[in-house]
Image (spheres, rainbow, N blue to C red):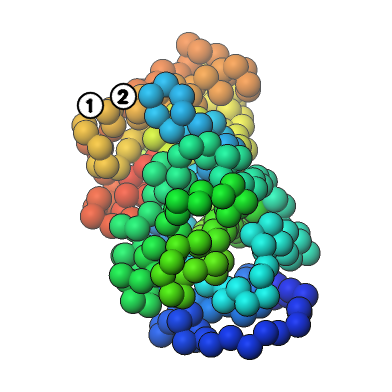
Amino acid sequence: MKFIYSLLFACISCVAFSQKTICPDVAGAVDHPLISKYKNSCIVAYDESKFNHVIFPASKIEYKKGSWKADKEITEEGKVTSIIYGIENTERATVLEVQRNYEQALKNGGFEIVYSAFGKKDIAGNSKIGRTYKIFANQEVLDNYQYTKTKSYFRFAFSSTAKNINADDAFFVARRKRDGRTYTFALLIHKNASSWEGLTDNIFIQAIIVEREDMETDQVSAASIDEKIKNEGKEVFHNILFDFGSDTLTQESYAIIETLSDYLKANPSQDYYIVGHTDNVGSLPTNQTLSEKRAKAVLNALTSKYNVPISQISAHGVGQLSPLSINTTEEGRALNRRVEIVLK
């Protein structure tokens, strides 16, 4: 059953204002079923991809070890909808007011707020969020939106101004899992204080929604692994996942690894390779190193968490050298990022 929630906001008295600059919605834009417009707002830019990879900051972005980065991140893949709303702010709403309204509406829709920050300093110190996480507020990214109003105009919706007021920005991330789907929802809210007509003192909201269809973990069992090993000499796991560019396992991966451990302990006389694979993004040496680290992460989980004997398994990485599909599409690259167990 598909749950659709409409986000409703309290009405305030209306003040006459010309809607020539922001409203109506840009042609081709479609409202996402999980979010409705804030009062007096319209869609000024819209983009959608059937499958993409997104990283959300889930803590303050700080300068450490020579680069800006959040200590906590959320990595998601799936259908990505990107929407920029412009609020014609005749009623003088504050950024905090908009943030709290959206957060409450999402909570009412079954979402959990996993990270929330108000003010430039709490979001990113002295760094703009778009410098590190380019999907947010980066002008080059916004220029590539499929449907947008005049690019030379609204591409500056999230630009900083000389005023540099702390209360001009807010950011939060929310998630919901239901009926086999995970929705990750991030909102960047910015009050534009530039002198450009249509931007001045209006509030802009960039919403990024990632919809992922969850893996059916009950389709993987010790028996199904045994059957694949007997017939093909290996089993392929697409649902053992890692944070982007790292060997950190996602929480969802441990259920699959536990099932794998059940199979290994049921076959103690056989030895196996744990083999990591990547797509072709990046150099071959980097990908080989990363794939080996990921294989070792699985091995470490099997031995330390689920007590599989270290003598039964060894970890190896082959990078991009053994693809299952082409690397020219997101779908193909997703298939190529995998972990395999191979009978020695």
Residue, far top: 311
Q: Nearer the viewer, residue 282 or 66?
A: 66
What's the distance in space between the residues labelled 2 and 1, CA to CA?
6 Å
Q: Name the residue under label 1.
A: 285
Q: Residues within 10 Å of mark 1 (few under 14, many from 20)?
A: few
Provide the secondary structure element on which disc 1 rests: helix
In which quadrant is the C terminus drawn?
A: top left
- Do residues under tags 2 and 1 come within 8 Å of each other at their CB atoms? yes
Quadrant in the picture for residue 253: top right
Q: Residue at x 63, y 88 (%)?
A: 16
Q: Mark 2 points at which residue?
A: 289
- Three-letter amino acid code of the residue under disc 1: Pro
Residue 137 relative to residue 249: left or right: left
Q: Which residue is drawn at 45% across and 54% down?
A: 161
Quadrant in the picture for residue 291: top left
Residue 62 image position (x, y, % from top left): 51, 31
Residue 32 image position (x, y, % from top left): 56, 73
- As drawn, 188 above or below 63: below
Residue 103 image position (x, y, % from top left): 71, 59
Residue 257 relative to residue 336: left or right: right
- Three-letter amino acid code of the residue under disc 2: Thr
